Image (cartoon, grey):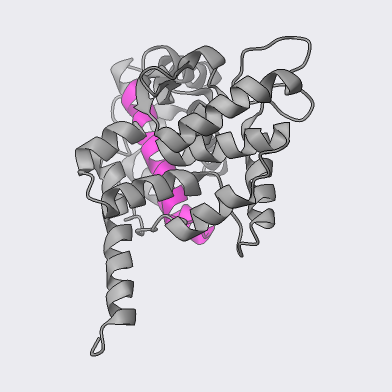
Amino acid sequence: MKDHVNSFLEYLQIEKNYSSYTIEFYKKDIEHFILFMKEQSIATLDDVEYFDARLYVSSLYEQQYARTSAARKISSLRSFFKFLLREKIVHENPFILVIQPKKGVRLPSFLYEEEMQQLFDSCDDSTPLGKRNLALIELLYATGIRVSECANIMVDDVDFEFSTILVKGKGKKERYVPFGIFAAEALESYMNNARSLLVDRSGHRSLFVNARGGPLTVRGIRHVLNDVMKKASLSGKIHPHMFRHSFATHMLNNGADMRTVQELLGHTHLSSTQVYTHVTKEHLRKTYMNSHPRA
């Protein structure tokens, strides 16, 4: 059974080109189901039937798994058994007819334009770290890139002539993302006057540098953003994706079309981008309810 799992994980890595982060989730989901098989005395993967799959789903609800987590586990196992069926290891896919629980629509949280301005104003760009912080948040907001993508940007990926950045996204997909004049000015100031003062002796080419001189990691970016949030005296916790959400929401609020935003965000499916229309509609509804005299 372990060999079959490893073969599937190799298939995800080599043929599907999934990230190690995604593959780890698949592995955990399959291991969780194998534990269930042992509890139910199911000897082999080929012995799993539709009834067993239904029983497993029921056990997820009994353990009070969130709908999103249950849906992910079902999807992982459906893909796993599809692979096993293709390899003729099993004779049927017991999860093919299992109905996934509907996911609740969770609206992305975002910062208003006034709040974004407070963040920019809170950065003291008279110091090297202050210049880095301003360049970081300007770039995140200007491009809507993921924090993991931001952490992987190299100095040579920035093209000031065309105001674009080469971004390595999910599944090793690359795309060019434009940035505006505010981000350009902050980046130039940081790269010309601060980065060389921060970088360590290794001379690495990562664009953003931490206080010790090494590459700024995703965790480090999260720490920087929380620190900037405190200095800006904004209430609530900030998370890195809020810049991505704010980028998409503000673009749509100001008339950008859905397809353009989809391409800029690097979304494979338009449905991933459409969630932001719910945010903009909710924003319009709240504005109307607060402003109209007979709302």
User: Between residues 16 and 151, which one lies in front from this camera angle?
Assistant: 151
Which residue does the image show at 72% across and 29% down from the upper left?
Answer: 210
Instruction: Give the image location of residue 138, x and y in percent.
Output: 51, 39
Q: Is residue 73 magenta?
A: yes
Instruction: Locate residue 111 relative to residue 259 in the image: left or right.
Output: right
Q: Tell me where residue 195 sits by quadrant.
A: top right
Q: Quick check: 258 left or right of 129? A: left
Q: Identify the residue at horizontal 37%, vertical 13% (top origin).
A: 15
Residue 185 within the segment the image draws in magenta: no
Q: Which residues are magenta?
A: 57-83
In the image, residue 295 lies at what x, y percent?
25, 86
> How would you classify the magenta stretch by its main secondary structure?
helix
Q: Residue furthest bottom?
A: 294
Q: Is residue 26 something one can see in this rendering?
A: no
The one of 197 and 90 positioned closer to us in this rendering: 197
User: Measured from the top left, where is residue 10 in percent x and y?
Assistant: 47, 14
